[in-house]
Amino acid sequence: MQLYNTLSAEERAQLIDEAGKERLTLSFYAYAKIEDPQKFRDELFIAWNALDALGRIYVAHEGINAQMSVPADQFEAFRNTLEVYDFMKGIRLNVAVEQDDYSFLKLTIKVRHKIVADGLNDDSFDVTNKGIHLKAQEFNNLLEDPNTIVVDFRNHYESEVGHFEGAITPDVENFRESLPIINEQLQDFKEDKNLLMYCTGGIRCEKASAYFKHQGFKNVFQLEGGIIEYTRQIKEEGIKSKFIGKNFVFDHRLGERITDDIIAQCHQCGKPCDNHTNCANDACHLLFIQCDECKAAMENCCSTDCLEIIHLPLEEQLKLRKGLQVGNKVFRKGKSDALKFKKSGDLPNKPLAKAEIKNIRQKIGIKKVLVGKAEHYYTKSKIGQFLIENKELSVGDKVLISGPTTGEQEFTITELFANGGPCETAKKGDQITFELPFRVRLSDKIYKIL
């Protein structure tokens, strides 16, 4: 009896192509007392594997948390597999806003200690004493109440690309970090403020609302079904969205567009962008925001170091990874000194306007080679003088001039002089000059952009 995957992601993708059937991406959760999680897990695998249902599912003594992809023509059959269990009868299935047949390519069901890592001792409080559930319009109404504090209980890389207007967005890596931070920040508002919370699908707020009621907060509310259900309701009922930007999701899509607002920026150049990518270096696998231009220049890498590594022979890459924990264990989320425009936890309350982004692109990811050094700048004639120490330089070449005071300046050579005379190509050892619209200094280096 098959209880585990036997196909690779690539093989599964090919089968999906051949089947040519529409698939639905959905999620659901339920808190319940499960006596034997392993037996429960195996039963689900057998039933769902027979329906070609795929996804990432966690089960524990406290319940189930699932994100899945199901063939559209098997949707009712899939729902029937849930109805077998009393605690999942009539359960709400959050169907994704944007569909993708390849959102999940394996059926992975894991038994965990908890369905969401929260770091709490559930024996110390009643997890069923939850906050009041609100539908989309009710949530919007309470948002407008000046006596309301709204908190995003997702992680920094989720809230960075989209969040509700005026929400507190903790700069945390995971859910369990946010609970004590928010509790400490809101100690003075337990009695008189409305504590309004939300997350992606509602599961984190189920536990958080009970925790904060246990901590003494009197007026605790949560968005029913999370951002996913909120989006469905505002579209069906024509309600104005108070959520701006994109909703991060944990399948290969990495996000669903809710509004056209782009409130984040490329972590490498600062351009308005909210598309996440994973670093192509398997020993890094950093999740970060990268625009199309940087993606092309950097070949999906987060740094020049990783860019160099992915071009090494596979054997050398494997040697560099030897002894490292790879995959999910090093799945760092946007925390790297190589990312110059990371602003977790410091998000604007309105979308970034293009005019707010300085038109200076950091030269991260631009392939360049050192050509020489600056020797002089003739201020009146605006002529820069350089010594070629390496490679050749020709008319039409694009160069990067870099220095601690000059910064990083790009320039295309349209006219070139070597050793006092005009030329098309200068070689190693030549003293060259060409007109420059900015001043250069002795500390500056000149690079040829490849």
Image (cartoon, helix red, strand yellow):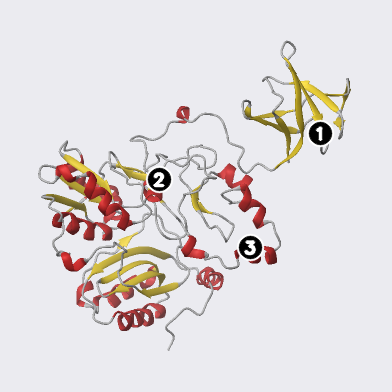
Position of residue 386 relative to residue 390, above or below, is above
What residue do we see at 18% from left, 68% from top?
A: 123
Q: Which mark is residue 320?
A: 3
Position of residue 354 relative to residue 131, above or below, is above
In the image, taking residue 436 as reference, residue 199 lies left or right, namely left
The disc labelled 2 sits on which kind of residue? Answer: Val
Name the image quarter holding the N terminus. bottom left
Question: Mark 1 and mark 3: span between their CA atoms?
Answer: 35 Å
As drawn, the residue found furthest toward the bottom would be 1
Q: Residues within 10 Å of mark 3 (few under 14, many from 20)?
A: few
What residue do we see at 21% from left, 72% from top?
A: 32
Disc 2 versus disc 1: nearer the observer: 1
In the image, taking residue 270 as reference, residue 317 lies left or right, namely right
The disc labelled 3 sits on which kind of residue? Answer: Leu
Mark 1 lies on residue: 393
The disc labelled 1 sits on which kind of residue? Answer: Leu
Question: Mark 3 and mark 2: span between their CA atoms?
Answer: 33 Å
Q: Nearer the viewer, residue 3 or 195?
A: 195
Number of marks = 3
In the image, taking residue 199 as reference, residue 263 lies left or right, namely right
Disc 3 versus disc 2: nearer the observer: 3
Q: Which mark is residue 161?
A: 2
Disc 1 versus disc 3: nearer the observer: 3
What residue do we see at 17% from left, 51% from top?
A: 221
